[in-house]
Image (tube, rainbow, N blue to C red):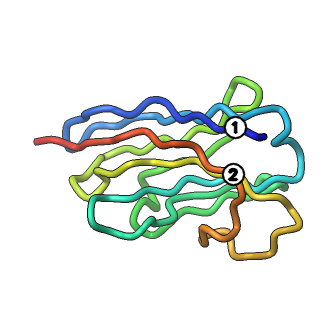
Amino acid sequence: QAQMVESGGGTVQAGGSLRLSCAYSESIYGDYCLGWFRRAPGKERDWVASVDNYGATDLADSVKGRATISRGRTENTLDLQIQDLQYSDSAMYYCAAGSATNWSPRNSPRRYEYWGRGTQVTVSS
């Protein structure tokens, strides 16, 4: 069973930045699309960013210009860096992986078969 584990969450002041990291098992390798989602209390799970198996990245409008998704410096890791954090960025953040044979859109949770348990990000004043 593939595993994904997020880290790097915490409480950050508005305007600050943070880097989330996701470590995933070796079975998630090669032709997988990797993504980040977030869910604020009482809201739907929203797509944040993704990187496909060719390395192409995509960002939600809510974080475009402030966020970067990248394969981590360490093997089998995925990073998400967000700058100029806003109160609306407060949420539980999840990393996810979807196989290349899954043709659902990259911004849809249906695209991803494997999920981490999440890491909480809270933006404070």
Q: Which residue is mark 1?
A: 3
| Residue topped by disc 2 | 114
Q: What is the x, y in percent for residue 104?
A: 73, 76
Give the distance between the C-alpha atoms of the residues marked 2 and 1, in whole angstroms. 7 Å
Of residues 76 and 119, the one drawn nearer to the viewer in this rendering: 119
Left or right of residue 42: residue 99: right
Specify whether 74 is left or right of 66.
right
Determine whether 106 is above or below 121 in the image: below
Of the 4 image quadrants, the one containing the C terminus is top left
Q: Amino acid at mark 2?
A: Tyr
Residue in the picture at 48% in, 41% down: 81
Quadrant of the rendered image containing residue 61: bottom left
What kind of residue is marked 1? Gln
In terms of sequence position, does the residue under pointer 2 or pointer 1 come before the other? 1
Q: Which mark is residue 12?
A: none
Quadrant where the N terminus is found in the figure: top right
